[in-house]
Image (cartoon, rainbow, N blue to C red):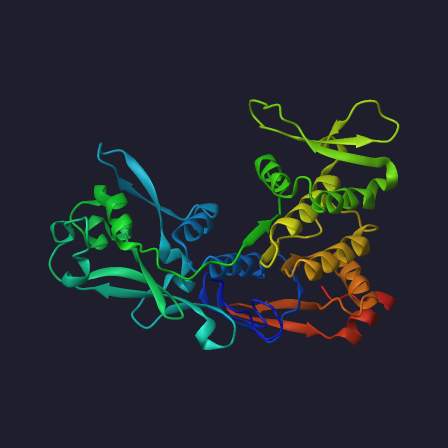
Amino acid sequence: MPEEKANNGLHLPDLVIRGFRGIKDLSIPKLGRVTLLAGKNSVGKTTLLEALSIFASRGRYSILSSVLARHDEMSKLLDEDDIEIETPNIIALFHGWDVTRNTSIVIGPSEKAGQLRIEKTFLTDKQLQLPGLEMLELFGDGEFQSFKVSYRDKEHMLPWFDVSQGTEGANFKNPRLHRNMRRALIKSDMPMEIKCETLGPSLLETNRIARFWDGIALTDGEEHAVDALRLIFGNKVERIALTAEEFKQHGRRIIVKLKGRSHPVPLKSLGDGAVRLFSVALTLTNVKDGILLIDEAENGIHHSIQPDFWRMVLRMARENNIQVLATTHSWDCVRGFAQAAADDQDAEGVLYRLERDDEDIWAVFYPEDQLKIAAEQGTEVR
């Protein structure tokens, strides 16, 4: 049964991130239904979204792996045939690669009970005697280094293979048994994760578009997706469909029926802006009661469309009970967001600018009255 949300109906009313990658210590005192995080390149915006994806998954191994693989932070081991295989280098998740006994990653609300923690731990011989695997035959004497992921009263273990010091630093006799060890150590009793999707900075992959469309086919969600395209093309957009035909490299594809054209055209032929708007609307209909993370929200969307884009996001987030966190380094995006949030009294839109000085990172809050000023006078807050 899903756990209850915070009093304001949000999964994260505020946010604390400590010890995660390039973020040593960051506190954001208030998050909205839709929160836009502005800031320069390399300030930590994408890292923040990665931390939130890990929090939403409750530290699932698959999400940790995907974050590390995205940054090429992998280590090499040997399989049963002495062929090199890659495994995620979990140490790289820790700020400064510091994995001493007293360090940990903390992600979640300011309320400690709701925080996700990842920390180094040691397993004893008794803990290694897990069902289905003779663990003691794999390890040397003494303690075995591992990572513990904990959330509320649940926890699971992740194997630590530190090959930076050679195979001896990995604390086991045979690196070829990586897969079996991972299956033995990772338990499945973590709390139910929050439904979470991440978009950007690149366009949504065709297979994900098809999967999301299948999730709303023949529902009101179809009309929301059509309305998103109408922000660009107006009433020229008549209908949208997903082809049943499979293409060798791209699978199925979305086609659009435009007024005045006898044949539908592929969505991607209408440009990146159309794909981006359609993808956001489509995802917002598929992640009900969950979290949507949008990296570089301005990508592909013309500045003249930004206010309407954010009105759509604010409205659909409210209607579908979704918490949205997005990043940008575009003033046009900030201005469009400020205008949309100022025009809608029920919008619950919050704007921050992230700042960094060496290892220190902090968030500058822009309250509602300053959003109105920014929208009306063009005050730049990037």
Q: Pinpoint residue 84: horizontal percent, then vertical percent.
A: 29, 36
Picture quarter with the C terminus: bottom right
Tell me the quarter of the picture where residue 100 sits: bottom left
In the visual, does 19 lie left or right of 333? left
Residue in the foreground of this view, choosing between 263 and 175? 263
Q: Is residue 381 above or below residue 327?
A: below
| In the image, residue 143 above or below residue 280 | below
- Is residue 222 visible in the rendered image? The answer is yes
Residue 269 point in image, percent of width and height:
74, 30
Residue at image coords 62%, 26% = 244
Q: Quadrant of residue 330?
A: bottom right
**Where is residue 53 shown, x and y percent of the image?**
51, 57
334 to the left or right of 242: right
Does residue 332 appear anywhere in the picture?
no
Of the pair 377 and 273, the residue shown nearer to us: 273
Q: Quadrant of residue 336?
A: bottom right
Q: Position of residue 56 (x, y in %)?
A: 50, 59
> Vertically, is 181 above or below 260?
below
Residue at 76% across, 44% down: 223
